[in-house]
Image (tube, rainbow, N blue to C red):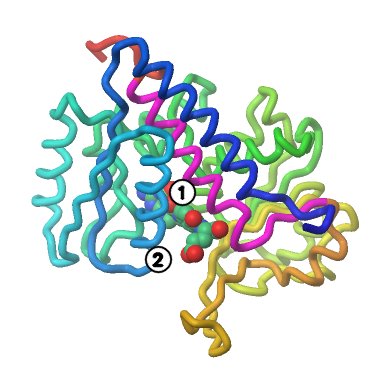
Amino acid sequence: MARNIIDGKKVAELLRQQVRDDVREWVGRGNRPPMLQAILIGNDPASGTYVGAKTKACKEVGIESETVTFPDTMSVRELKEAIRTYNNDDSIDGILLQLPLPGHLHPSQVIETIDHRKDVDGFHPMNVGRLAVGQPTFRSCTPAGILELFRYYSVMTKGRHAVVVGASNIVGSPLAIMLSRENDSGKATTTLCHKYTRDLTRHIIQADILIVAVGSPGLITGQMVKEGVVVIDVGINRVSDSSRDKGYRLVGDCDFESVAEKASLITPVPGGVGPMTVAMLMKNTLLAAKKSIYPSDNM
Ligand code: L34
């Protein structure tokens, strides 16, 4: 692997080993294994792959998991009903509602139904709010995984200019919050760009650290970035490729060749951020089981 390529697969594996050791210790002290309930709605092939990767990781680290699959015709009421059942089930520590949802199910409405103490994705407004004011919380898995990569590769954020492209609730927004907080993984001057940003290049060229989470293949090219920039490419796009067995290959939001030429560090797709997302979910599920974030029962 070239010297400037971030090996997300390797770091994720180290993280999973750590979680596996911690789970073993937790169970060794007489506790039942952590348990993750995954909810998959419809038959989006990418979502199926991601949930599959998550249940596989659970198995590897000693976390129990179950995946329930609902048809994409299910109603909001039925989904909320199912979530309440999981909320009330003491044998379930974490609830994962895989996104995106079919169009008629509005994510924010449904996510609020999840018990914030079981919200291992960190999407519940309670957890996002706690993140924003610097209280202990479940941190959304992809941004938390990115900060973990910075830690592993000694990427300093303090005082540097981080530019986040894409303001989704899953990645861009929580990441911008994390990077701008006054703690060891933050202290960055943070710019959050989105689809209304004028002259995107003017912002991107200034980035010491560039995180792109848009879902638009080839959006960022080498000419747009500063020499020495650290690039995190969160996009996972399937582009058709008849030379592959599956008929497609995965690419990020960066034109990898040209951006990698100028970057001091860059994540590949696949093998960059994706595996980190899965590893951080394992970490959060263990935190949920240990009730580390919300210790008291009467919240
Ligand atoms: N609720 N929905 C919820 N939580 C999440 O954290 C997610 N996300 C995103 C989509 N919806 C979600 C994921 O799980 C994206 N995502 C995710 C998870 C795993 C991988 C990619 C995205 C992953 O394992 N990627 C591999 C390649 C997988 C493949 O072959 O398609 C990689 O190396 O990037």
User: In the figure, residue 287 lies in which quadrant?
Assistant: top left
**Horizontal relation, residue 174 to residue 160: left or right:** left
In this rendering, the answer to whether 254 lies above or below 22 is: below
Q: Is mark 1 within 8 Å of ligand 1?
A: yes
Percent across and percent down for residue 16 are 51, 36
Q: Quadrant of the C terminus?
A: top left
Secondary structure character of the magenta stretch overall: helix
Report if residue 283 lies within the magenta region: yes
Q: Name the residue at 63% across, 67% down.
A: 253
The magenta stretch spans which residues?
265-289
Report if residue 199 lies within the magenta region: no
Mark 1 belongs to which amino acid? Ile
Q: Give the residue pinned by disc 1.
A: 170
Residue 272 bears which disc, if any?
none
User: In the figure, residue 291 lies in which quadrant?
Assistant: top left
For marks 1 and 2, the one nearer the N-term is: 2
User: In the figure, residue 288 lies in which quadrant?
Assistant: top left
Q: Give the residue pinned by disc 2.
A: 46
Q: Mark 2 falls on what kind of element?
A: helix
Percent across and percent down for residue 258 are 81, 71
